[in-house]
Image (cartoon, rainbow, N blue to C red):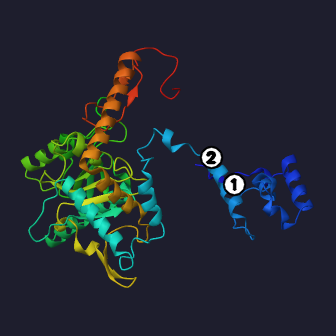
């Protein structure tokens, strides 16, 4: 990848435009034009935006705002971005609450105890949604907020690896070759020195094969990662089949469910689908708040089945800002806004609101699938009727000779 800062701009080359800029700046070196009635009539309109070094002098706020806004106009419009799963709309009331939390450092529990309490409420609600088992002595779910699903998956991988290593140590067995069975979660495995054991897709199967996944398990397997809603086709991997095969073979291998996308869809559209803590081998689940959780990026969540699956040595008890704090994240400082936004959505919409939205999205996706296949002749790769995420993945029919492909479209 070419770093954009290595590309020379007009001001750095001996072009007519560069000469004109230098002449103009040399002729008028007084600060009077900083109060020009128009941003584009000021000297700053002739200068390139700083890219390497912080400028020596100040810049009027309205000019700084306008120039940066113009610069950002080269970005795409988030409302038109169909290539990723990101929330692009929240109500004004939610935005106001999130704005009020911009200056709160979430990790400072002593100073902002209610923000921490709101996180705990969200974890409890998500745990209930995923059927986390409750215990008489502990009614609360075990989990935390993250900056996104990637961090959540890494925390899950760390927890599985540590628990596996502790059990191997206690049994006097080697613990230097952990592996993870998956068809994703590559970053987590590589970052934490875990062997990747892939279940590869085929031309007609775009998800993990339960039999192949369980066949890859051995004594060094820390877990199996299954996806509830794949990135490419939105299909739900068969978590129950993996669970049942493990039980049938007497294997205690844990399952982590990457429900980044499907975690806020399946419970409302397919509530009878068994993929969560109703299955005994599922020990942890992550979900994204900024995908179908309906919060601006970035926020994610992870919930564990019970405390035994989160080794205590991974939880840091810190007295850093005036109070004892228990923390298990890869980040320390972060804003409170997204956590507040998640809580707003959950109590504002409730289960009925989420159900209505996800049902509407599913119906819209089904409509587009019908149009694309029946009227335009595309082959639909995603599943409709709520059997997968509310999206449409399609391709051209290879049997029909065309002078263009999907990239051209």
| Residue located 78% across and 50% down the image | 10
| Residue located 45% across and 39% down the image | 83
Q: Position of residue 223 (x, y in %)?
A: 22, 55
**Quadrant housing residue 395:** top left
Outermost residue on the front side: it is 93
Q: Which secondary structure lies at badge 2?
A: loop
**Quadrant housing residue 239:** top left
CA gap, disc 2 and disc 1: 10 Å
Q: Position of residue 126 (x, y in %)?
A: 24, 56
In the image, 387: left or right of 67? left
| 304 w.r.t. 166: above or below | above
Q: Which residue is mark 2?
A: 73
| 117 w.r.t. 378: above or below | below
In the image, 56: left or right of 86? right
Q: Is residue 191 visible?
A: no
Q: Which residue is mark 1?
A: 67
Outermost residue on the right side: it is 27
Q: Position of residue 185 (x, y in %)?
A: 34, 52
| 176 w.r.t. 365: above or below | below
């Amino acid at each position: 990848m070419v770093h954009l800062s290595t590309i020379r701009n007009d001001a750095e080359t001996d072009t007519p435009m560069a000469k004109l800029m230098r002449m103009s700046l040399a002729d008028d070196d007084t600060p009077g034009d900083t109060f020009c009635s128009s941003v584009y009539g000021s000297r700053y309109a002739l200068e390139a935006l700083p890219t390497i070094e912080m400028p020596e002098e100040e810049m009027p706020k309205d000019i700084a705002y306008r120039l940066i806004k113009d610069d950002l106009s080269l970005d795409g419009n988030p409302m038109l971005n169909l290539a990723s799963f990101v929330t692009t709309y929240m109500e004004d009331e939610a935005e106001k609450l999130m704005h009020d939390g911009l200056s709160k450092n979430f990790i400072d529990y002593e100073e902002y105890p209610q923000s921490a309490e709101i996180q705990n409420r969200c974890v409890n609600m998500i745990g209930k949604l995923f059927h986390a088992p409750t215990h008489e002595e502990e009614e609360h779910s075990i989990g935390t907020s993250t900056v996104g699903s990637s961090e959540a998956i890494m925390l899950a991988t760390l927890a599985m690896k540590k628990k596996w290593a502790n059990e191997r140590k206690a049994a006097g067995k080697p613990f230097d070759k952990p592996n993870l069975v998956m068809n994703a979660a590559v970053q987590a495995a590589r970052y934490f020195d875990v062997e990747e054991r892939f279940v590869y897709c085929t031309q007609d199967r775009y998800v993990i094969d339960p039999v192949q996944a369980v066949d890859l398990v051995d004594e060094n397997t820390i877990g199996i990662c299954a996806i509830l809603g794949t990135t490419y086709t939105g299909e739900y991997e068969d978590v129950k089949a993996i669970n049942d095969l493990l039980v049938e073979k007497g294997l205690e291998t844990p399952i982590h469910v990457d429900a980044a996308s499907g975690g806020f869809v399946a419970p409302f559209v397919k509530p009878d689908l068994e993929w969560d803590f109703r299955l005994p081998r599922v020990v942890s689940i992550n979900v994204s708040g900024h995908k179908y959780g309906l919060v601006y990026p970035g926020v994610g969540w992870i919930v564990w089945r019970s405390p035994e699956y989160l080794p205590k040595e991974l939880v840091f008890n810190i007295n850093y800002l005036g109070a004892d704090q228990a923390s298990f994240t890869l980040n320390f400082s972060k804003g409170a806004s997204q956590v507040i936004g998640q809580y707003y959505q959950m109590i504002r919409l409730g289960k009925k609101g989420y159900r209505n939205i996800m049902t509407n999205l599913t119906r819209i996706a089904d409509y587009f699938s019908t149009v694309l296949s029946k009227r335009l002749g595309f082959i639909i790769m995603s599943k409709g009727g709520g059997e997968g995420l509310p999206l449409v993945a399609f391709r051209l029919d290879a049997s029909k000779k065309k002078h263009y492909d999907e990239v051209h479209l």
